[in-house]
Image (tube, helix red, strand yellow):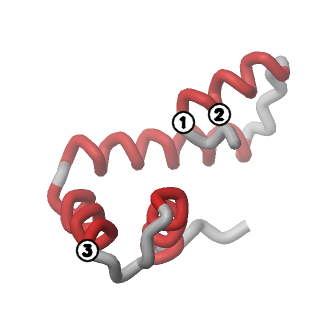
């Protein structure tokens, strides 16, 4: 599986906000992410967690899995 591109990430974020990729809100979010070290660190941490999860094929309970998805904001 290929790592998502920045554009794909932005589209995902904006889709979840109900915004178009070139909308003022998405442009503001992109600018914020490009300049905010805290958000960059957060997203790097999430990315690392997902990569470790995939690489080591970690077996955890369904409850723990659901809590992780909820914490990462990935639960639908």
Image disc number at residue 69: 2
CA neighbours of label 2 inside 10 A, class few (<14), some (14 to 19), many (20+): few
Q: CA distance from mark 2 to mark 1?
A: 5 Å
Residue 38 point in image, percent of width and height: 23, 41
CA neighbours of label 1 inside 10 A, class few (<14), some (14 to 19), many (20+): some
Nearer the N terminus, badge 2 or badge 3? 3
Where on the picture, by quarter, is residue 23?
bottom left
Q: In the rendered image of this protein, does residue 74 appear above or below residue 28?
A: above
Where on the picture, by quarter, is residue 65?
top right
In-image side of 13 versus 23 (left or right): right
CA neighbours of label 3 inside 10 A, class few (<14), some (14 to 19), many (20+): few
In-image side of 6 versus 69 (left or right): left
Residue 25 point in image, percent of width and height: 29, 66
Q: Residue furthest bottom?
A: 22
Q: Residue beneath label 3, please? A: 24
Q: In the rendered image of this protein, does residue 10 appear above or below residue 76?
A: below
Q: Residue at x 44, y 77 (%)?
A: 20
Q: Circles 2 and 1: CB distance less than 8 Å? A: yes
Image disc number at residue 72: 1
Q: CA distance from mark 2 to mark 3?
A: 29 Å
């Amino acid at each position: 599986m290929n790592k998502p591109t920045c554009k794909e990430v932005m589209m995902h974020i904006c889709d979840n906000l109900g915004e178009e990729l070139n909308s003022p809100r998405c442009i503001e979010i992109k600018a914020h992410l490009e300049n905010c070290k805290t958000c960059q660190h957060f997203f790097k941490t999430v990315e690392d967690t997902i990569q470790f999860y995939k690489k080591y094929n970690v077996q955890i309970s369904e409850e723990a899995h659901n809590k992780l998805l909820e914490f990462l904001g990935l639960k639908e």
